C-alpha cells in the first residue's frame, strides 16, 4: 500500500528507539537489517528512517508532520495547481562539499521512473506529465518526464492534473536527491561507508551488518545549527524484551514495549513510560492475484467476519489498541473512516454469517479450507495468528503458520508469493491518500495484495485531483468503502505507542512512530 506504503511493514512487537552515552549521542534500535540505504530501493520502515537522516528532499515534515521547506527554501504553485516551481537553497551542499542543484533532483527523479532502476515504487510521481508512458516502457526518453531544471536553483514539476496532496508527496523518501557522481563511480556499492554522499543532517560513518549503523552530524547541512544530536547509532535489537533490557542498561534512549512489559513499566518506570494512539494499522493482506481467496469474495468476507477483534485487543495483544474494521485509523485528520458493514453486528451474528458464506463456497468443518499465513517470526505475531486460527476453525478454515525472518518474509510479500500475511503499516504523514494509495493498480510493490479494481482506481483518481477539500474527502471515503466491500485485507487493530523514553530526550518521540533524528535533542 503505498503504503508508501511504505508499506510499512513493521514486524509487529516494537517500533523504533534510541539512547545517549552523552547528551549529543542518540541510540535508536533497528528491528531488522536494512535491505538497502538506496531511497529508491527501500520498502520497510527502518531503512526509510535512516535514509531520512542521511538525505533531505525538496520539502520535509515538521514536528507536527506538516510539509515545510527542505532542500527547497520555498515553492510556487500555478493557478491551475498543475505547475510546482521549487526554489533551492543557494547554500545547500552535499556532504563532500559539492553544491546541491536542481540537476541532482532531475537526475534522481528520472532514475526513479526508469524501469531499469527497479525502484520499489515511483507512485509519488504518478501524476507528473509523461510518467505513465515511461513506466509502461512506451516512452524510452526519460527527458519526457515533466520535470525541468531551468537553472541550478530552480526545479519545475508539471502535473497532468492538480494534486492537493502533492506537498505531502514531495516529502516521500523515494524523492530524496541522489549524488549522481557517486552512483556512477561505485555502482551498487554507492551506499557503503566511504562511498555514500548525502545532503541531509547526517553522514554515514559505518555499517556493521546485524550490529549497528553509525551516522554523524553533517556540518555542511543547510540547517546544521538547528541539529542538536551529534551522532546517531542505529542498533540492531532482537526483540522488545532485549530492547527493554538494553534501555534499562542505558544503551538505548527509547524502546517500544512488548505487551508483557507494559504493566511492569507503568509501575516501575512511571517517569519514563509514555502512551499515545498512533497512525498505524496491523492487518492481514490477502494475495489477490491467485488462489481461492483471490477468486471468491465470500471467503474473504467470512475470514473477516469470524475474527473477534475485541478479544484480540483485550486479551491476546492488550496494549491499549482499538479494534480495526477499516483501513484508516481514527487519528487521521479531517476524515471519517469507512468500516466494514458488519461492525454493528454481534460476534454471534457475524459467526453465523461466516459459516453460511463458507458453506456456500463449498467449505466447512468437515471440508476445511487450508490457509497459510506468512509472518515475521516474532512471538507477538505468532500469538495473534494462533488466536485467529482458533476463531477460524469453527467456520471451516485450517490456518497454517509460516514464520520467516523479516526480510525473507517481506521479499515473499513484495513478490506476492504468499497467501495471507500479517503486517503493520505506519504511514509517513497524516493524510488519507497515503494508505489508500497502496491499493491502486499502479502502486507497484506497495500494492502488496495485488488488488485491482477499476472502480477503486477511478474513485481514488477523482479524489486525488479534486481541489475542493470536501469533494476530495468524499471520493476518498467512497474509495475506502469499495475496499471494505471487496475485502482484499483483514484489519485487526489500530496501533498505539507504548514506549519508555530517556527523560532527557526532547522532541516528538512519544507521539510519532518514526521521528526524524534532526527534530530530537537532549536537555542540558
Image (spheres, rainbow, N blue to C red):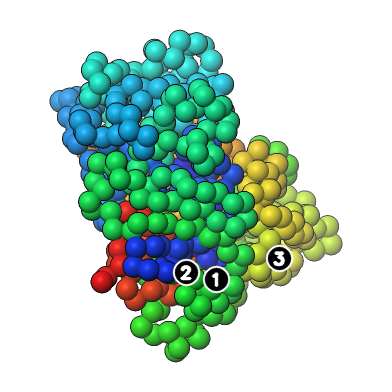
Q: Say which residue label 3 marks.
A: 389
Q: Residue at x 34, y 63 (%)?
A: 24
Binning the other alpha carbons within 10 Å of mark 2 as few (below 14), some (14 to 19) or many (20 upward) gives many
Q: Is residue 342 visible?
A: no
Compared across the picture, whether 508 is left or right of 113 comes to: left
Q: Quadrant of residue 294?
A: top right
Binning the other alpha carbons within 10 Å of mark 1 as few (below 14), some (14 to 19) or many (20 upward) gives many
Q: Say which residue label 1 marks.
A: 243
- In the image, residue 90 above or below residue 25: above
Measured as percent of width and height from the top left, residue 31 is found at 56, 59
Q: Residue at x 52, y 52 (%)?
A: 213
Helix, strand or loop under label 1? helix
Question: How many angstroms separate mark 1 from mark 3 (CA)?
Answer: 29 Å
Question: How many angstroms separate mark 1 from mark 2 (CA)?
Answer: 8 Å
Helix, strand or loop under label 3? helix
Q: Say which residue label 2 marks.
A: 252
1 vs 3, front mark: 1
Verify CB contact (< 8 Å) between mark 1 and mark 2. Answer: yes
Compared across the picture, whether 251 is left or right of 219 comes to: right
Compared across the picture, whether 156 is left or right of 308 comes to: left
Question: How many angstroms separate mark 3 from mark 2 (CA)?
Answer: 36 Å
Amino acid at each position: 500500500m503505498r503504503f508508501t506504503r511504505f508499506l510499512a511493514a513493521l514486524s509487529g512487537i516494537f517500533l523504533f528507539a534510541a539512547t545517549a552515552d552523552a547528551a549529543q549521542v542518540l541510540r535508536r534500535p533497528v528491528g531488522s537489517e536494512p535491505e538497502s540505504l538506496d531511497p529508491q530501493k527501500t520498502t520497510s520502515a527502518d531503512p526509510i528512517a535512516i535514509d531520512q537522516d542521511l538525505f533531505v528532499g525538496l520539502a520535509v515534515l515538521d514536528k507536527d508532520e506538516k510539509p515545510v521547506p527542505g532542500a527547497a527554501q520555498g515553492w510556487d504553485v500555478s493557478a491551475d495547481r498543475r505547475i510546482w516551481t521549487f526554489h533551492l537553497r543557494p547554500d545547500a551542499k552535499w556532504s563532500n562539499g559539492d553544491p546541491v542543484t536542481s540537476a541532482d533532483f532531475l537526475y534522481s527523479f528520472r532514475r526513479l521512473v526508469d524501469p531499469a532502476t527497479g525502484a520499489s515504487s515511483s507512485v509519488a510521481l504518478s501524476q507528473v506529465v509523461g510518467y505513465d508512458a515511461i513506466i509502461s516502457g512506451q516512452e524510452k526518453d526519460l527527458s519526457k518526464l515533466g520535470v525541468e531544471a531551468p537553472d541550478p536553483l530552480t526545479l519545475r514539476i508539471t502535473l497532468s492534473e492538480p494534486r492537493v496532496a502533492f506537498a505531502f508527496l514531495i516529502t516521500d523518501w523515494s524523492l530524496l536527491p541522489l549524488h549522481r557522481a557517486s552512483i556512477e563511480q561505485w555502482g551498487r556499492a554507492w551506499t557503503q561507508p566511504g562511498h555514500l554522499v548525502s545532503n541531509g543532517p547526517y553522514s554515514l560513518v559505518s555499517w556493521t551488518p546485524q550490529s549497528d549503523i553509525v551516522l554523524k552530524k553533517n556540518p555542511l547541512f543547510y540547517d546544521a545549527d538547528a541539529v542538536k544530536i551529534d551522532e546517531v547509532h542505529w542498533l540492531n535489537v532482537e526483540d522488545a524484551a532485549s530492547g527493554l533490557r538494553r534501555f534499562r542498561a542505558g544503551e538505548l534512549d527509547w524502546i517500544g514495549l512488548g505487551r508483557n512489559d507494559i504493566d511492569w513499566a507503568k509501575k516501575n518506570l512511571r517517569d519514563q513510560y509514555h502512551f499515545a494512539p498512533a497512525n498505524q494499522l496491523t492487518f492481514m493482506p490477502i494475495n489477490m492475484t491467485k488462489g481461492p481467496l483471490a477468486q471468491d469474495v465470500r471467503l474473504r468476507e467470512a475470514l473477516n467476519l469470524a475474527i473477534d477483534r475485541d478479544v484480540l485487543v483485550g486479551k491476546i495483544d492488550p496494549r491499549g489498541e482499538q479494534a480495526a474494521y477499516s483501513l484508516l485509523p481514527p487519528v487521521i485528520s479531517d476524515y471519517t473512516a469507512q468500516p466494514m458493514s458488519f461492525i454493528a453486528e454481534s460476534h454471534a451474528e457475524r459467526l453465523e454469517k461466516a459459516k453460511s458464506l463458507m458453506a456456500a463456497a463449498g467449505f466447512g468443518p468437515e471440508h476445511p479450507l487450508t490457509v497459510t499465513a506468512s509472518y515475521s517470526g516474532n512471538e507477538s505475531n505468532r500469538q495473534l495468528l494462533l488466536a485467529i486460527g482458533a476463531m477460524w476453525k469453527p467456520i471451516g478454515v485450517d490456518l497454517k503458520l509460516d514464520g520467516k525472518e523479516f526480510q525473507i518474509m517481506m521479499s515473499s510479500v513484495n513478490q506476492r508469493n504468499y497467501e495471507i500475511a500479517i503486517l503493520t503499516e505506519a504511514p509517513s504523514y497524516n493524510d488519507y491518500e497515503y494508505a489508500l494509495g497502496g491499493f491502486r493498480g499502479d502502486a507497484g510493490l506497495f500494492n502488496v495484495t495485488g488488488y485491482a479494481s477499476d472502480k477503486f482506481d477511478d474513485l481514488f483518481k477523482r479524489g486525488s485531483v479534486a481541489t475542493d477539500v470536501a469533494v476530495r474527502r468524499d471520493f476518498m471515503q467512497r474509495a475506502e468503502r469499495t475496499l471494505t466491500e471487496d475485502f482484499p485485507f483483514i484489519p485487526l487493530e489500530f496501533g498505539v505507542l507504548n514506549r519508555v523514553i530517556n527523560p532527557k530526550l526532547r522532541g516528538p518521540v512519544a507521539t510519532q512512530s518514526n521521528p526524524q533524528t534532526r527534530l530530537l535533542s537532549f536537555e542540558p
